[in-house]
Amino acid sequence: MTADAGLPDTLRDLPAWTPGAAELADLELLLAGVYRPLTGFLGSFDTAMVIAGGRLADGTPWPVPVTLAVPKELTGHERIVLQDPEGVPLAVLEVAEAWQDPTSQAWRLAGPLEALRAPAHGPFHSLRRRPDELDATEGDVLAESPEGGRPPTPPVNVLAVATREPLHRKQLGQLRQVAEQLGAKVLVLPMLSGEHDESLVRALLGVRRELPDGTRIIPVPLPAHADQDRDVLLHAHVAAAYGATHLLAEREMDGTAIPLVVPEPWAYDADVEVWRPVARIEPDHVQAELTPARLNELLDAGEPVPDWFTPPAVAAELALARPPKHSRGITVFFTGLSGSGKSTVARGLADALVERGGRTVTLLDGDVVRRMLSAGLTFSRADRDLNIRRIGFVAAEITRHGGTAICAPIAPYAVTRAEVRTMVSAVGDFILVHVATPLEECERRDRKGLYAKARAGQIPEFTGISDPYEEPDDADLRLDTSETTPDEAVAQVLGLLVDGGWVRPD
């Protein structure tokens, strides 16, 4: 596609591309100057050097690759407009290199960026700031430059906290203690990654009164990286770009852009009922901390999070982000060969859940979806993948709003099923049921005569005959309808949902 007609004539006919979510986050930070010294997406040599040693080709420290994946057909252009998901142009990429990633085989483009407009999407966008937008008159963390030729004001220590989790009473106490020791202002940087971003920011805003005066909260779109050490190094770069002089961290590390500060251990003193440094607590008065696993158990069961652990405002956001299992959105995704019985079991499960009440149920059966949602698609691999992605998108939206989506496509390919699991798991829970009825039994049933046509060569790329079915190794339940009745199969799935807490016992 080409860029929109609202651009200058010199850019209007350029090809346009919408990057993925992580790359859009990188683009926003590149354009905002947060990723200095980077001015654009990295090429093959810089990327290899960063992966190998955490440095750019010129020796400048940089912790993570910042690259842009594109379809191969875009690699022949000299300039490309990068746009957001709504088609709003954000920047022009001057292509310096088109290269193929040796590990993923994906095609990538590298080169400097010319900003067209600032991104204007996402919740709490009004809180986001470029580093050069911080203004001391708003109580920001950067030091003010005096006028009249007087000596400049000495820089103020700024303690940054880069977090993907709410701040509980322990972290709040440690933060206040370290800020006081440094004589520092506080900068809280919620790292947004697309999952429960709104809840994270609301939880941090909800404890502003418990943070030191003048604390700033600036959301930063920064997806997590698998390598935790490199993630910390990147957090230090980002914090430094916003004027921080120190970064609160769980452990010490060398080579960071600004010094890391590790707070002393804190615990809850059950005798006086306060959080404070462990060194000041009698050993037999230390109360065991609430572990993440135990916290999730409380939320899953709908039980209150104790006030000694976290402020009420944070507890409320945790409950919103992770509702009790019996009221949480869920997708039950059946996969199996044509004729395996998955549609029959899926319909039976939908009926059983409706009869029990308490849940809104939507059935996305393969044949119905083909007529209503994916009409016009062929049975090529590309179109079958697109069909499953469409089902996954609809199921994720149903799940996001607390509903129950029951899906029953063939879904023969593992990678596409994994995409759907990822989509749904970002907003709720995902249950995969493999209806593993043998091919011989499916072919014997063959109500529609499809297997006979496939054997005769009349249907190309037919799953199980001329195209593979990749059996899942991550199924939560395996059914064989040649060995069970439909009612028995439904009962097995229903039992899984009851045992898991998603459905109340009858």
Image (tube, rainbow, N blue to C red):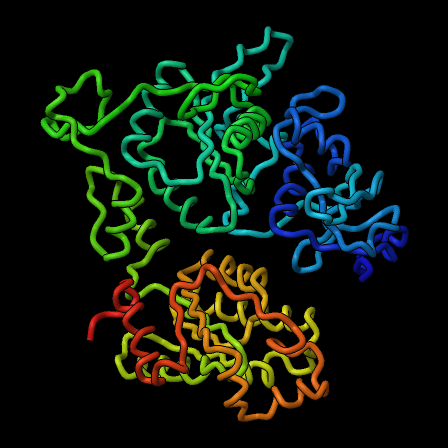
Residue at 32% over, 30% down: 172
| Percent x, y of residue 274 | 18, 29
Q: Looking at this view, name the residue that lies furthest to the front.
A: 440
Q: Nearer the viewer, residue 456 or 88?
A: 456
Residue at 67% over, 76% down: 466
| Percent x, y of residue 47 | 71, 33
Locate residue 271: give its quadrant.
top left
Q: Is residue 291 left or right of residue 445?
A: left
Residue at 60% over, 26% down: 241
Compared with 160, 501 (above or below) is: below
| Percent x, y of residue 323 | 32, 58
Q: Is residue 270 left or right of residue 61?
A: left
Compared with 149, 406 (above or below) is: below
Q: Quadrant for the N terminus, please.
A: bottom right
Locate residue 130: give its quadrant.
top right
Residue at 59% over, 84% down: 372
